Amino acid sequence: MRHFLTLKDFTSAEILEIIEIGLEIKNNLKNKVYKKELQNQTLAMIFEKSSTRTRVSFESGMFQLGGHALFLSSRDIQLGRGELVKDTARVISSMCDMIMIRTYEHSKIEEFASFSSVPVINGLTDSYHPVQLLADYMTLVEYSCEKNIVCAYIGDGNNMTHSWMMLAAKLGFELRIATPKNYEVDPNILKESLEIAKVSGAKIIITNDPKLAVKDATVVTTDTWTSMGQEDEKKERIKIFNGYMVDENLMSLASKNAKFLHCLPAYRGLEVSEETFEKHSKIIFNEAENRLHAQKGLMVWLDKQRNIRHSKLDLESNTLSQ
């Protein structure tokens, strides 16, 4: 069973194939060509962390593909009342065709997937946000920026940073990460990314200097300084992250036509200036829309992999019976 928990589990060819499917689906939608590739299928969406873009994109995407999506918050299911993860996984996967989970601990989604009989998609954990990176890379492809990427990530060493590391490591481009001291990336995830990068030729550079990271970069990206669950740290983080705002002074160090990405929600005056955000708002909101199309590509790809797996199992079963 193929799940989508982190980009670490996918080859570069598979990642690009998912992007290609998503772009084809997006183009079909723009031309009012509707293919119900997940006709009559059901997606269970489990939200322990709330989200605007994740809910709307998955729910709309499943509808556009001919299926149905169920919204399940921790208040709606027994998982939020102490039922074991493995029991919830067995039950929901017996009734639905695919499951998306947005939660805190990455270990929880790994346990859920190990007991699920259908594909599980990571809608976000504290460690990774891989569906967002599919949308980000799709956007770069649309803007013809995917060649010779030099990407600068400025801000917190969080799930977005970890996912950028995995994407760079898999696809072989240069990634420079600038974070304040004591807010660096997870050392274990960095180690994994660097091991993968040895094969792809990727460069992953860690620094505390935003200017060094942005120098001649073709892509600059950031994220909120205070993620969900860190609200009590907000005032302290604002002080510590002073100097890490992406503004026009910082962007002037990047390459002439550098693109700025933001996964949203954006807090102007903190991680990004109002001027920089609005200057790049067209690509940012296209990036947001691409959550819809990239995730449709992902769901169609996972469904195809499941059908291939079932066909192989049927063939093996028939061979044994003969």
Image (cartoon, rainbow, N blue to C red):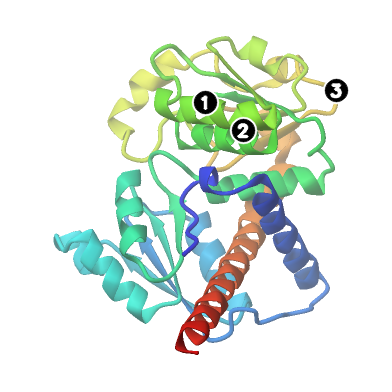
Q: Position of residue 312 (x, y in %)?
A: 55, 75
- Position of residue 188 in the picture relative to residue 287 (left or right): left
Nearest to N terminus: mark 2 or mark 3: 2
Q: Nearer the viewer, mark 2 or mark 3?
A: 2
Q: Image quadrant of residue 150?
A: top right
User: Are circles 2 and 3 on residues that touch, CB within 8 Å?
Assistant: no
Type of residue at label 3? Answer: Lys
Rendered view: 33 above or below 322: above
Q: Position of residue 75 (x, y in %)?
A: 24, 64
The residue wearing badge 2 is 169
Sort mark 1 into few (<14), some (14-19) or many (20+) by Cα contacts within 10 Å.
Answer: some
Sort mark 3 into few (<14), some (14-19) or many (20+) by Cα contacts within 10 Å.
Answer: few
Distance between the Cα atoms at labels 2 and 1? 29 Å
The residue wearing badge 3 is 256
Q: Residue furthest left?
A: 82
Distance between the Cα atoms at labels 1 and 3? 24 Å
- Position of residue 69 in the picture relative to residue 11 (left or right): left
Q: Going 56% across and 36% down the picture, which residue do you hit?
A: 166
**Residue 270: numbered disc:** 1
User: Are circles 2 and 1 on residues that touch, CB within 8 Å?
Assistant: no
Nearest to N terminus: mark 1 or mark 3: 3
Q: Nearer the viewer, residue 248 or 73?
A: 73
Rendered view: 212 above or below 143: above
Q: Nearer the viewer, residue 253 or 172?
A: 172
Distance between the Cα atoms at labels 2 and 3? 25 Å
Q: Position of residue 195 (x, y in %)?
A: 54, 27
Q: Going 73% across and 14% down the picture, which residue do you hit?
A: 215
Q: Nearer the viewer, mark 1 or mark 3?
A: 3
Q: Going 14% across and 60% down the picture, which residue do you hit?
A: 82
